Image: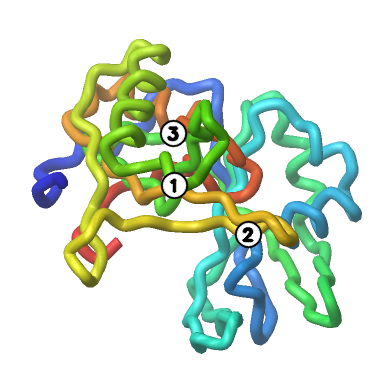
Amino acid sequence: MLAQPSNQFASAPMPSSYIELHFPTRGRTWFADQNHRLLGAIAKQHPTLHHLEGLAINTISGIPDKQGNIELTKRSRLSLRCPSQSLLPVLTLAGTTLTIDGRSLSLEDPKIRPLRPVSELKARLVTIKHPSGKFKNVTPEWFLGACNRQLQALGIEASVGIPADEKEEPARKTLRIKRQTIVGYSVIVANLLPKDSVLLQAKGIGGKRRMGCGYFVPFRLNG
């Protein structure tokens, strides 16, 4: 477990070859279990984005109704990260409408910004496959060790932990892909150097980064 965040680095942009785009979304309701469907809708209308190297897609937020849906709000947005040289292909999403099973999601012109160094980052879900292929072996202890190994492979030295859920247990999360369930955990990485913070946001850890996994954002107490 990790303590509450301390400070953020200066807000001045740090040079980076990656950028982040935030597309305001318009619609009524969307799927709570959305990641695979969202990627499919994007790939169908914009095939060039499906295999775009370095692309990461975050989960769209909303108000859950506990019946498998979320209500979209004025703050709902589609957030993506990509290498700066891929900006033009990603901009083709602006002004388009994604449709899945009769539901529509309209994307407005995005806000574009460079990645900024923040000393504490959080990912809602990180997935790392256990060598055995069995979900039951993805224990918090094994998972934290795997996270540390991936951070070390990136040359990042930092503190990594799993936040507690409402039951004060490690926040275990799942990702549904059709009939398959993938297990992972929420992750907080703290004490990051500025260059390492930007690198982690750009590269992430774990898999399924086009499905909202390993997408690190600034950690806040309510986030």
Q: Give the CA distance from mark 2 to mark 3.
A: 23 Å
Q: Nearer the viewer, residue 186 or 19?
A: 186
Picture quarter with the C terminus = bottom left
Q: Residue at x 43, y 57 (%)?
A: 173
Q: Residue at x 68, y 59 (%)?
A: 109
Q: Residue at x 35, y 36 (%)?
A: 143
Residue 62 locus on image (x, y percent): 51, 76
Query: Which residue is disc 3 drawn over?
Result: 201
Say whether residue 199 is left or right of residue 179: left
Q: Amino acid at mark 2?
A: Arg
Query: Which residue is disc 2 drawn over?
Result: 176
Q: Is residue 217 visible?
A: yes
Q: Give the CA distance from mark 3 to mark 1.
A: 28 Å
Q: Give the CA distance from mark 1 to mark 2.
A: 16 Å
Query: Where 81 falls versus 36 (above or below)?
Result: above
Which label's residue is closer to the chain start, 1 or 2?
1
Q: Nearer the viewer, mark 3 or mark 1?
A: 1
Q: Are marks 2 and 3 in contact (CB under 8 Å)?
A: no
Q: Nearer the viewer, mark 1 or mark 2?
A: 1
Which label's residue is closer to the chain start, 2 or 3?
2
Which label's residue is closer to the chain start, 3 or 1?
1
Q: Nearer the viewer, mark 2 or mark 3?
A: 2
Q: Amino acid at mark 3?
A: Gln
